[in-house]
Amino acid sequence: MTDPEPKQEQRQTQDLFERILDKVNGDPMKALLAKAKEEIPGEFGVSGSNQELVDHLKKAEAVGSVTRQQVFALLQEAEENGDQTILYYTPKTDAIRDLCSDPDEVAKKLFGEGWRETSSFPYLPRLANGSEVVDFRTHYAGKAKDWLMKVYTF
C-alpha cells in the first residue's frame, strides 16, 4: 500500500510552483535566487525565462538554499499586490471592534484553540467552486492589532 502523505506533499509542492509561474513575475524570483546563491551557493541558475526561474527555485529549495517559507513569500507578495478583491470589515459595536483588535482571539474564534498547529496555513486548495480560507496571519505588517485573512473563491 502506498503512503498518501508523500503524494499529497508532492501535489502541494507542484501547486505552489504552478501558482508562482502563473502569478509571480521574474524580477522577485531573480532577486531571491541571487540572494540565496550569495548566502548559500548551490547548483542552480539565477536567470532565464519564468519557467526556467521556477525550475531554479525548485532546485534551490531542494538543496536547501531557499526555504519553503521564502517560496511561499514570493506567492503571497504577488497575490497581495496583484489582481484581487479586498474586503474591509467595519465592526458595528465597540465590543466587536475590541475583539477584532486582538488577532490571536479572532483566530481562536475562527479556527479553534491551537489553530497554528492544526490549520496548515498557508494552504493551497484546488477547488472547482465555493470558497476556502487559505491563510490567516496575526500582527500583520508588524502591527499588533492587525490581521489578514485570505479567502480563495472559485
Image (cartoon, rainbow, N blue to C red):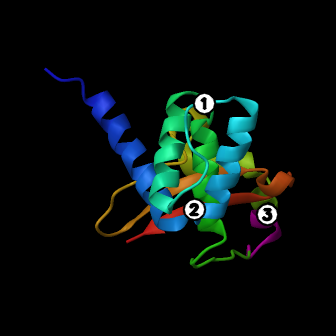
Element assignment for label 1: loop
Residue 24 location (% of width, % of height): 56, 63
| Rendered residue at 64%/43% (across/down) | 70
In the picture as drawn, the residue positioned furthest to the left comes out as: 1
Residue that badge 2 annotates: 150
Pointer 3: what residue?
Answer: 95
| Quadrant location of the C terminus in the rendered image | bottom left
* Picture residue at 37% right of the left edge, 47% below the top: 14
Of tags 3 and 2, which is closer to the observer? 2
Residue 52 appears in the rendering = yes
Residue 61 position, x and y percent, is: 54, 35
Do tag 3 and tag 2 residues touch (Cβ < 8 Å)? Answer: no
State the residue position of label 1.
42
Which span of residues is magenta-colored? 91-97
Which is closer to the viewer, label 2 or label 1?
1
> Does 92 lie within the magenta span?
yes
Q: Residue at x 75, y 36 (%)?
A: 38
Relative to the observer, which residue lies in front, 44 or 99? 44
Question: In the displayed structure, does residue 5 sit left or right of residue 40?
Answer: left
Quadrant for the N terminus, please: top left
Residue 51 rendering spot, x and y as whole percentages? 45, 58
Q: Which three-letter amino acid code belongs to the residue tagged 2? A: Lys
Q: Is residue 137 above or below residue 50?
A: above
Task: Give the residue drawn at x 31%, y 70%.
Answer: 129
Q: Viewer-nearest of labels 3 and 1? A: 1
- Give the mark nearer the N terminus: 3 vs 2: 3
Q: CA distance from mark 2 to mark 1?
A: 34 Å
